[in-house]
Image (spheres, rainbow, N blue to C red):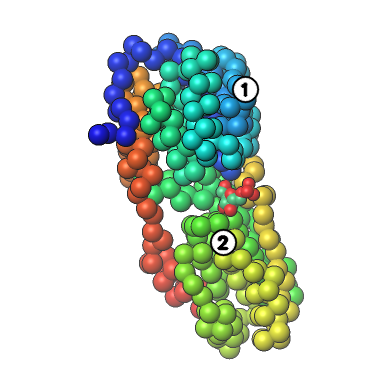
Amino acid sequence: MALYDTKIEPGNIKRIGVMTSGGDAPGMNTALRAVVRAGLHYGYQMFGIKKGYEGLLAGEIYEMDRHDVSFIMNRGGTILQTARCKEFETPEGVQRAVTIAKVFKLDAIVVIGGDGSFKGARELAKAGIPVVGIPGTIDNDIGCTDYTIGYDTALNTVIDAIDKIKDTACSHERCSVIEVMGRDAGYIAINSAISDGAEVCILPEKSFDINEDIIKPVIACRNKGKRHFVVIIAEGVGGTMHIAEQIKNITGIVTTATILGHIQRGGSPSSRDRVTASLMGLKAIETLHAGDINKVIALRGMDYVALDIDEAINTKKHLDEDMIRANKILSL
Ligand code: F6P
């Protein structure tokens, strides 16, 4: 038996809720604007749900018109705010959320967020509330889609920061150990490493040996005449300060550690994020308008497609080994 319905009589949807959930990402506001404007265009009543599933449980639900989403497409963060909600992870929490959705007569909910948010949406789908997911996370770690809203902006923020750190590292002939975001995924790490010519890049997907994978390449670079070094560590690897200490103690090179942190999640979305968020938002509404429910919008090549939510969640993404190989060849 199917986990949930995939079709609905289009006329049965009149009121659509939209939320942002999980870690915020630049472009979430742009996606919200697109969802609200497209929904109104097709004649739906649109409702903003504040603070993700937490706000749904609290009934923080407000009708939105086109002016409520004016002047937000260029703003970082999310005007709906966001949260990670423990209660919603329980069957009782889901049941209560379903009841609240019914109290507010929401016929469908659009969820802008990452993997965890889609798992929550799938629970709503199973309980009979139609959903559509839009991938928004700076990590670009959602398997079913080539791209997630926020990734390009975050990457450019990281590159800008590393460029600046590199200026001073060059001047002082230092080694800079820089931690970038990515709890489980190394996309920001490997792409910023290639973009900035980092000598070393350590990813959460791969185990590493401090001597083989960090100390030896740094020494090899020094022997080739390099006098400054960038070592990128993805957040999920952990131990950034300790790694910097080890480099200093073993090689004798003055080594500094910088944890870029939440600066990576803020800022005005790039053109790529604005365009992607706009087209994904429109696609989400047009999917519901066609009577297709319980989907995730994905970018596949040049095409925006609506995939079954269960299939979308179960599709895994793997780091491209060629990227890792390319960085090793080009930086050493
Ligand atoms: O948004 C994704 C992400 O940035 C991860 O890379 C990171 O591990 C996590 O969020 C941190 O989120 P928070 O600090 O909000 O718990």
Depth order, front residue of 237/54: 54
Task: Answer whether residue 270 is visible to the viewer in this image.
Answer: no
The number of numbered discs placed on residues in the rendered structure image is 2
Residue carrying label 1: 60
Depth order, front residue of 316/186: 316
Task: Give the number of the disc on residue 236.
Answer: 2
Residue density around tag 2, few if under 14, some if 14–19, many if 20 or more, within 10 Å: some
* Rendered view: 246 above or below 236: below
> What residue is shown at x 31% (from left), y 20% (from top)?
8
* Rendered view: 229 above or below 238: below
Task: Answer whether residue 164 is visible to the viewer in this image.
Answer: yes
In the rendered image, the quadrant that contains the N terminus is top left
Mark 2 in CB contact with mark 1 (< 8 angstroms): no
Residue 233 in the image: x percent, y percent? 59, 66
* Rendered view: 41 above or below 302: above
The yes-or-no answer for disc 2 within 8 Å of ligand 1 is: yes
> What residue is shown at x 38% (from left), y 67% (from top)?
321
Q: Check disc 2 and give the amino acid type.
A: Gly
Question: What is the spatial separation of the Cα atoms under label 2 and label 1, in whole angstroms?
Answer: 33 Å
Which residue in the rendered view is the most extreme toward the bottom? 223
Residue density around tag 1, few if under 14, some if 14–19, many if 20 or more, within 10 Å: some
Task: Give the number of the disc on residue 95.
Answer: none
Circle 2 SS class: helix
Depth order, front residue of 328/291: 291
Which residue in the rendered view is the most extreme toward the front? 92
252 relative position to 73: left or right: right
Q: Compare marks 2 and 1 and give the one earlier in the sequence.
A: 1
